Image: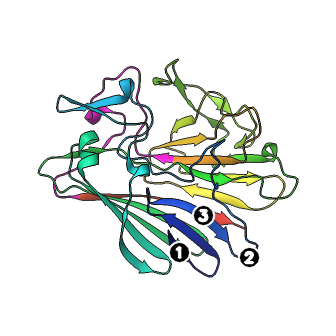
Amino acid sequence: MVYLENDRFRAAIDEKGAELSSLIGKSDGTEYVWQGDPNIWARHAPLLFPVIGRLKGKQYTLNGQAYSITQHGFGRDLEFSISKQCSPSCVELTLVQNDITKRMYPYDFSLTIRYTLDGNQLKKEHIMQNPNDIPLYYEVGGHDGYNICLSEGETIQDSYVQFEGTNEMHPLRLDENILLTGESDTVPLDGGRLWIDRETFRTDAIMMESPKIRRLTICSQKHSKKITVAFDDFDYVGIWSAYKPFDVPYVCIEPWSTLPDCSFLGQELEKKVGVRCVAPHQSETLTFTTIVSE
């Protein structure tokens, strides 16, 4: 585990998956990251790489070759190395190809995750380097779970996700196989608020294109604490929590580079909606930031 700290917050990063495992406010000890529960959802904030979501037939093709890979890819389950401890409030963790990744994803690659804790903001940069002589296609995203019900007596029904500058959202439709259909719905929001209850995620994540949505804020009507996720570099976003027959006290905000598989497209990686492409011997960086208001 790697720890970052400043005068306001303390963060813990697990080398497995370069996963944010804790973010604690020093003023009152509030834990803002979901701590995992195997009976609900055992993860905290997994990295999605090199694919996002479910794949049609649990595989994709690249240059005519089929590759089997698990939902959300392998990034969340592999050990990253600490490549640079920049300061007490900044660290870089890196994953490169190995025999395990080559069976699922044929490229050589270097993916560095840089976390920087600055005031009340935790910035997460995804730096993808392509050492190959050919273009590299990939998908990357976040799946960060944030605690709700932060005060005594609070219920999930007190929580909402605030959308900026709009009073409606346009969730993408899923078919019976939980693949995107290419259609969307228009859902009104109460003053830009998506209220949370037990039924909010009955049909899985709320997935949206985000040309006008670049930040979402988790709020409560019972206190002033807020968690904002700003994701200017990501064109798609999901909102999710496990669907259970009881209240689940967390919500995930998930910035995505790419959409999960669509029923109307084939399995070619390079043709997926929003797939990223890095030119030979080049790199690119995609960033999202968690902002805590206490």
The three-letter amino acid code for the residue at tag 2 is Ser
In the picture as drawn, the residue positioned furthest to the left comes out as: 133
N-terminal of the pair, mark 1 or mark 2, is 1
Drawn side of residue 236 relative to residue 243, left or right: left
Q: Rate crowding at label 2 as few (under 14), some (14 to 19) or many (20 or more) other CA atoms within 10 Å.
A: few
Q: Main secondary structure of the magenta part?
A: loop
Residue under pointer 3: 22
N-terminal of the pair, mark 3 or mark 1, is 1
Question: Do the residues under discs 1 and 2 have CB atoms within 8 angstroms?
Answer: no
Q: What residue sits 73% from the left and 71% below the top?
A: 29
Q: Which disc is residue 27 wearing?
A: 2
Q: Which residues are magenta?
A: 255-282
Dot 1 lies on which element?
Answer: strand
Q: Residue 266: x, y in percent? A: 31, 23
Q: Quadrant of the C terminus?
A: bottom right
Dot 3 lies on which element?
Answer: strand
The three-letter amino acid code for the residue at tag 1 is Leu
N-terminal of the pair, mark 2 or mark 3, is 3
Q: Is residue 202 visible?
A: yes
Q: Is residue 276 magenta?
A: yes
